[in-house]
Image (cartoon, rainbow, N blue to C red):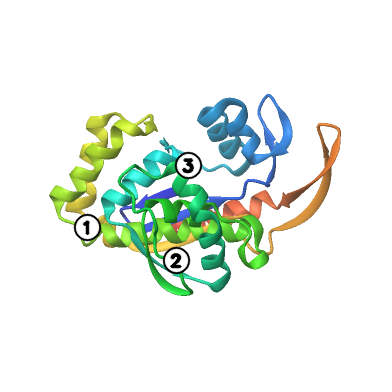
Amino acid sequence: ILLSINFKLKTFTITSFMRDSYVQIPGVGNNRLNVAYAVKGYPLLKATIENNFGITIDNYVALTFDTFIKFFDALGGLDINLQKSESEHMNKLLPVYYTLYAPADYPKNPEPAKEGMNHLDGVQLLVYVRNRTSGGTADFGRTQRQRTVMSETIKKMTTLSVDKLYELLELTLPMVTTDVPPAECSSLLMKMITRNAFSFKQQTFRIPDNGTWEEKIVRIAGTNQQVLSLNFAENTKRFKKLVCGVDS
């Protein structure tokens, strides 16, 4: 996911890059986008996105499942509207996730999720953002759920005090992997607070966008595999228009 903050247009844009996008990976060749991160982590993923889409990425943050849970528990969880299939999926997997990932002080018998609005804790949110089976939408549905969680997180930030925002930063910064120095993280948070950035207009986008891709069977590692064949120029054009307000 690429988070773009435009202080001039006062927008937050949350963009998902589909993992099955068929791209040219420098030094590797044609393959799925997620292979870039699997091979050499963020540096190769950054180079792959920039080379294929002409989109410049400034910095990154990577976090573990444990950090994800601790952050959202410290945030106080999120209210998420679940479809029936999503609640059923969560109730099926939650016991496993609680066993594998829940801190020791978690409740032993959480309330079952239900169709409609639910208040989800960190472990439940992890189940939600990893779900790619409900509704038969595969990874398209999963990336939508991830954008939903990021969008709701930004909205909740508007309700928090300055002290609470810095408390969250101090809690999570030592637990994530990032190329942003701690002092710069602190100054960026202050800029966002003073500019009221958490209240900026929210936008979401997905690459590939509707009408800019087709399913294709290709040979990868000696086997036929299904990928997303993209119109790169059109996706880049739509992204830059949405994020920067310009036609590329």
Gap in angstroms between the C-alphas marked 3 and 2: 18 Å
Estimate how packed mark 3 is, as few (under 14), some (14 to 19) or many (20 or more) residues with alpha carbons within 10 Å: few
Residue 196 shows which numbered tag? Answer: 1
Amino acid type for the residue under numbered disc 1: Asn
Q: Which residue is mark 2?
A: 112
Estimate how packed mark 1 is, as few (under 14), some (14 to 19) or many (20 or more) residues with alpha carbons within 10 Å: few
Residue drawn 24% across the image and 61% down it: 158
Residue drawn 55% across the image and 66% down it: 88
Q: Earlier in the sequence, mark 3 or mark 1?
A: 3
Gap in angstroms between the C-alphas marked 3 and 1: 38 Å
Residue drawn 83% across the image and 48% down it: 217
Q: Which residue is mark 3?
A: 100
Estimate how packed mark 2 is, as few (under 14), some (14 to 19) or many (20 or more) residues with alpha carbons within 10 Å: few
Q: Secondary structure at mark 2?
A: loop
Amino acid type for the residue under numbered disc 2: Pro
Q: Nearer the viewer, residue 169 or 69?
A: 69
